[in-house]
């Protein structure tokens, strides 16, 4: 599903939390999928995924073949199920 089921809140004061009502245990961030995925990356946060993609681009890899997942913290069994269903 592409339904929004969670939201991470962060600010410059060091606040890192999931918004009230978020499905912290089953939701994952999913990047825009390419037409045909060749790699899948699971990251702790969305900024990790963005940074990884940027580093790949700096190294000359401009292909659009990867899907990035972010767990918003520690990986849970429910998130593993969500990611496996997506793949």
Image (spheres, rainbow, N blue to C red):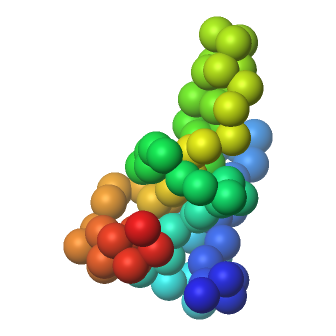
Of residue 57 and residue 74, the one placed in the foreground of this image is: 57
Q: Position of residue 33 (x, y in %)?
A: 66, 59
**Is residue 48 found left or right of 80 in the rendered image?**
right
**Is residue 84 found left or right of 27 in the rendered image?**
left
Q: Is residue 68 visible in the rendered structure shown here?
A: no
Q: Position of residue 41 (x, y in %)?
A: 45, 45
| Figure quadrant of residue 52 | top right
Q: Which residue: 65% across, 20% down?
A: 61
Q: Position of residue 4 (x, y in %)?
A: 68, 83
Q: Is residue 56 above or below residue 7?
A: above
Q: Is residue 25 above or below residue 41?
A: below
Which residue extends farthest front? 36
Q: Position of residue 14 (x, y in %)?
A: 63, 43
Total numbered badges shown on the rendered structure? 0
Of residue 75 and residue 42, the one placed in the foreground of this image is: 42
Image quadrant occupied by the C terminus: bottom left
Of residue 34 and residue 79, the one placed in the foreground of this image is: 34
Q: Which residue: 69% across, 41% down?
A: 64
Q: Is residue 36 visible in the rendered structure shown here?
A: yes
Q: Which residue: 64% across, 10% down?
A: 59
Which residue extends farthest top? 59
Q: Is residue 3 above or below residue 70?
A: below
| Figure quadrant of residue 55 | top right
Image quadrant occupied by the N terminus: bottom right
Q: Is residue 19 above or below residue 53?
A: below
**Is residue 11 found left or right of 15 in the rendered image?**
right
């Amino acid at each position: 599903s592409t339904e929004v089921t969670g939201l991470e809140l962060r600010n410059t004061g060091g606040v890192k939390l999931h918004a009230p009502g978020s499905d912290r245990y089953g939701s994952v961030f999913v990047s825009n999928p390419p037409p045909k995925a060749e790699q899948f990356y699971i990251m702790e946060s969305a900024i990790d995924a963005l940074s990884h993609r940027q580093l790949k681009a700096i190294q000359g890899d401009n292909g659009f073949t990867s899907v990035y997942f972010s767990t918003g913290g520690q990986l849970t069994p429910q998130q593993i199920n969500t990611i496996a269903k997506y793949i």
